[in-house]
Image (cartoon, helix red, strand yellow):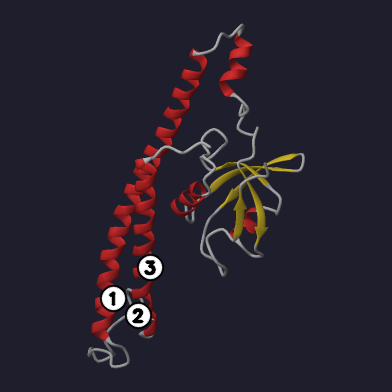
Amino acid sequence: MVVPMPNPTKDLVLKLMGEKEKLESRISEYGVILRNNDDVGMHGTLVDADGYPRNDIDVFQVRQARQQIICLQNDHKALMKEIEKQMHKLHAEAAEERAQGLSHKASGMHLEDDSEMSNTSNGSCASSTALAIAKVNMINPGSPAEEAGLKVGDELLEFGTINCRNFQKDLNQFGIIVRHMQNQRIPLKIKRGNQHLELILIPKTWSGRGLLGCNIVLPDV
């Protein structure tokens, strides 16, 4: 059994993602206050035609909610910048680790020719489409996953920056990408039967649960 080494950067990313979700939850809670006050939003007027505070809403509560939302949104913006920074660091560390692993592997072998060296250094993941990293086993109708063209049984070869070279058999890696790339384009490479396809998936809120509306599992062994 291989025990994964601790990764402080990955742990920090997961912690930051948790803080991001808490911030978004608080922003949503204050948004409910604005909706409950005649859906006044962030810019709706708080005075009547005569210039007096409106008596059909709680003006004080609305002002407090708006102020909190502004502060939380600023915190959210700063947090997203830090998440992006740590994500780049995480991918750089993974690339360095792979390079070191290949170097150590090559140094311990007697390779007869350049062809053998190429095959050995890349192992079973000689190309980005060699191995499936995950499989789709459920798609919800009307979901972002369905809009992207994903189907049950599709094998994921690449999911954004995740491929068979850096996938650690941890489905949380997909969650990190999805949350970080909400409302942004994630390029996918999939295998469907004998076909190799390229799709674009955009994680976003929709009428169902989650940002994708599909279920991803590890591929069959």
Q: Is residue 44 above or below residue 176?
A: below
Which one is closest to the eye, mark 3 or mark 2? Answer: 3
* Helix, strand or loop for disc 2: helix
Q: Residue 33 carries which label?
A: 2
Check disc 1 and give the amino acid type: Ala
Residue identified by numbered label 1: 65
Q: In which quarter of the image is residue 46?
A: bottom left
Q: Is residue 194 left or right of residue 186?
A: right
Q: Which of 109 and 206 is in front in this view?
A: 109
Left or right placement of residue 188 versus residue 197 in this view: left
**Residue 215, image x and y in percent?**
61, 57
Q: Residue at x 35, y 85 (%)?
A: 37
Amino acid identity at mark 2: Ile
Give the label, 3 or 1, closer to the camera.
3
Residue 202 position in % (x across, y down): 54, 54
**How far is disc 3 from disc 1 in space, using C-alphas?**
14 Å
- Please tell me the numbered disc located at residue 25: 3
Q: How crowded is mark 2: few (under 14 residues within 10 Å), some or many (20 or more)?
A: some
- Identify the residue at image location x=48%, y=13%: 107
In space, the residues marked 1 and 2 are separated at their CA atoms by: 7 Å
Return the mark for residue 154. none
> Who comes first in sequence, dot 3 or dot 2?
3
| Mark before the other along the chain sequence, 3 or 1 | 3
Q: Which of marks 1 and 2 is nearer the N terminus?
A: 2
**Toward the viewer: 220 or 215?**
220
Give left or right: position of 126 versus 18: right
User: Where in the figure is residue 191, as x and y percent of width and height?
Assistant: 69, 42
